[in-house]
Image (spheres, rainbow, N blue to C red):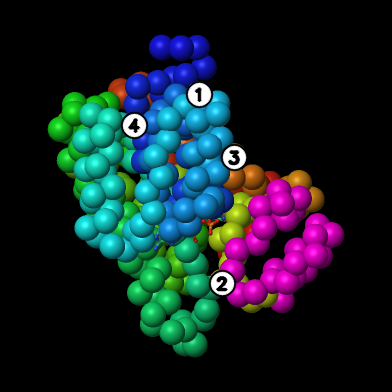
Amino acid sequence: MPEGQPLSGKTAIVTGASSGIGRSIAETLGAKGAHVYLAGRTAAAMDESKKKIEEAGGAATVVTLDVRDVAALRALVTDAAEETGRVDIMVNNAGLSYPSKIIDADPEEWREMYETNVLALLVGCQAAVKAMRACGAEGHIVNVSSVAALRRDSGVYGSTKHAVNTISASLRDELEEDTIRVVTVMPGAIATNFARNFDPEFLEGFVKMTGVEVEVKQGEKLPDELLEKLQPILSQLLGDPQDIADAVLYSVTQPIRVNVEQIVVRPPKQLNL
Ligand SMILES: NC(=O)c1ccc[n+]([C@@H]2O[C@H](COP(=O)([O-])OP(=O)(O)OC[C@H]3O[C@@H](n4cnc5c(N)ncnc54)[C@H](OP(=O)(O)O)[C@@H]3O)[C@@H](O)[C@H]2O)c1
């Protein structure tokens, strides 16, 4: 194994790799030698990350899909297994929040959160276990939850992350006799596009601090440059996506006899999103 390349010869799949935490995880696993399958909706961002990984000598494949499409998500995993002969790491990261109050919300927002944060994660777990067993992998499934799963009043979004924790714990038990470990990663507030569905007035205050001139529109992403400037300014309240990627790298590079169950990574001060 080349020095500094602990994931050399391994295949990793990351959903929601087109932004924030997932993008950082994908680039980190790629830099450590894994062939990374970047899966998400926004091709341009994933193409940029693929280029970065390849320029550093790694391998990457971009798959544009909506994780709510069960057949497409299954095909992502089976294609990766067929093309590289294996699947070693599955990172179920794609997710989103609509922070509306329960009495005001549109049920379509609940549907999107449940289909993305819970159903797609289940499908990703199931497909990954089948592929990992088929190639005899010492596999790692990483389910991205949230500190919202540690609070009982974290709304509908929080309820999806409570579900993620329960699913991860149950799957971890189901796989005790396998060479597949399941880790639940719970980030605190991290500087990403996660807040895109929040009230623009709430976000404008943060944006002003960066000095970057940009109109905040609900549902739309913020420029990478702005997020990169914002995080160091608000480092007491907002973590860097790399902090989460480092935790993921730690868990997937442990020997298979080590069951890393849960990791909470948050900035010094707690912001309850
Ligand atoms: N940032 C935080 O403060 C925080 C805290 C705790 C937990 N989390 C969790 O961390 C995970 C990543 O979020 P983030 O903070 O990195 O937010 P983000 O910057 O908004 O990234 C979310 C990613 O998920 C993708 N995605 C969403 N719905 C999808 C769908 N239907 N099909 C395919 N991809 C989809 C997005 O794709 P597009 O680029 O195409 O939109 C994007 O790549 C989520 O599970 C989130 O709940 C975040």
Q: Which mark is residue 57?
A: 1
Q: Which residue is mark 3?
A: 242
Q: Nearer the viewer, residue 61 or 107?
A: 61
**Mark closer to the observer (3, 4):** 4
Label located before the other in sequence (1 or 2)? 1
Q: Amino acid at mark 3?
A: Gln
| Span colored in magenta | 201-230
Q: Which residue is mark 4?
A: 11
Q: Amino acid at mark 2?
A: Gly
Instruction: Look at the picture and state if 222 lies above or below 53.
Output: below
Q: CA distance from mark 1 to mark 2?
A: 35 Å
Element type where label 2 sits in the image: loop
Q: Nearer the viewer, residue 46 or 202?
A: 46
The question of residue 202 being in magenta is answered with yes
Res 110 quadrant in image: bottom left
Q: CA distance from mark 3 to mark 4?
A: 20 Å
**Mark closer to the observer (4, 1):** 1
**Identity of the residue drawn at 54% across and 50% down:** 45
